[in-house]
Image (cartoon, rainbow, N blue to C red):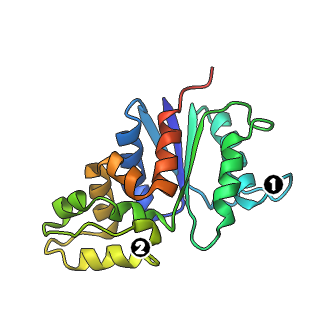
């Protein structure tokens, strides 16, 4: 299955999102990354709110480019309505048909998924990391990740840190500790199958 991966940030681009996708859905053979904020993909016309329209436009673009499916992940940040808009786009068939998609929203941000598995963090950072209370409730998971990386004795760029943690993370652990974001996203990934 050839998949278009769409997300917001440099950490996802560097391989972290693809690692999460492959650990949940190993049948995905090929991934191509693109940035969700591309101006030529955004549409301002038609029914639905911002993220709904953007997700629909990405599905249409992925199908036109010959991809078998779309995987799109955005951060919730402070927009509570983002989850509802992506849920609507996940179920939309009027404009997109049954084009396969797994749309995810990271609560509060993608960085929370990096914090979910203390064993993966310990393995990558080389020191014991305590189990997080609730990554989805962390007010600033990006800052928490930066603080963990500061303590590391190995010189590692943040993007490489994210990718390595994602490669070692246990998807079941992420589903349990980030149920509203990663749990929903993982279920959608597992149900992906090529369009008939």
Whether residue 111 is visible: no
Q: Quadrant of residue 138?
A: bottom left
Q: Who's the residue at 66% across and 52% down the image?
A: 86
- Which numbered dot is residue 29? none
Q: Nearer the viewer, residue 181 or 168?
A: 181
Residue at the image position 52 percent from the left and 32 percent from the top: 191
Rendered view: 161 above or below 31: below
As rendered, which of 40 and 181 lies closer to the eye? 181
Residue 170 lies left or right of residue 37; in this view the side is: left
Q: Seen in the image, is 100 located left or right of residue 127? A: right
Query: Quick check: 139 above or below 107?
Result: below
Q: x and y percent of residue 91 in the render? A: 69, 40
Q: Residue at x 34, y 61 (%)?
A: 116
Looking at the image, do the residues carrying marks 1 and 2 touch, with CB atoms under 8 Å apart?
Answer: no
Residue matched to label 2: 141
Whether residue 194 is visible: yes
Extreme-top residue of the structure:
196
Q: Residue furthest right?
A: 46
* Residue 169 image point, x, y percent: 29, 52
Q: To which quarter of the image does residue 136 belong?
A: bottom left
In the image, 58 versus 145, the foreground residue is 145
Tell how many labels.
Answer: 2
Crowding at mark 1 (Cα within 10 Å: few <14, some 14-19, many 20+): some
The kind of secondary structure element at disc 2 is: helix
For the C terminus, the image quarter is top right
Q: Tell me if residue 89 comes above or below residue 127 in the rendering.
A: above
Which residue in the structure is indicated by mark 1? 48
Percent coordinates x, y for residue 167 in the rendering: 29, 50
- Spatial CA distance of label 1 from label 2 is 30 Å
């Amino acid at each position: 299955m050839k998949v278009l991966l769409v997300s917001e940030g440099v950490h996802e681009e560097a391989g972290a999102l693809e690692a999460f996708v492959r650990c949940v859905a190993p049948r995905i053979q090929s991934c191509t990354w693109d940035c969700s904020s591309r101006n030529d993909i955004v549409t301002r016309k038609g029914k639905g709110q911002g993220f709904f329209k953007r997700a629909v436009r990405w599905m249409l673009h992925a199908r036109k480019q010959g991809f078998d499916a779309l995987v799109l992940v955005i951060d919730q940040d402070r927009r509570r309505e983002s989850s509802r808009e992506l849920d609507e786009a996940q179920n939309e068939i009027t404009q997109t048909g049954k084009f396969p998609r797994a749309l995810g929203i990271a609560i509060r941000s993608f960085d929370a998924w990096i914090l979910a598995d203390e064993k993966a963090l310990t393995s990558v950072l080389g020191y014991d990391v305590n189990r997080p209370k609730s990554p989805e409730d962390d007010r600033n998971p990006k800052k928490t990740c930066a603080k963990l990386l500061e303590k590391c004795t190995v010189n590692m760029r943040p993007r490489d840190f994210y990718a390595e943690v994602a490669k070692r993370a246990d998807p079941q652990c992420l589903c349990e500790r980030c149920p509203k974001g990663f749990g929903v996203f993982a279920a959608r990934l597992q149900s992906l199958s090529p369009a008939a």
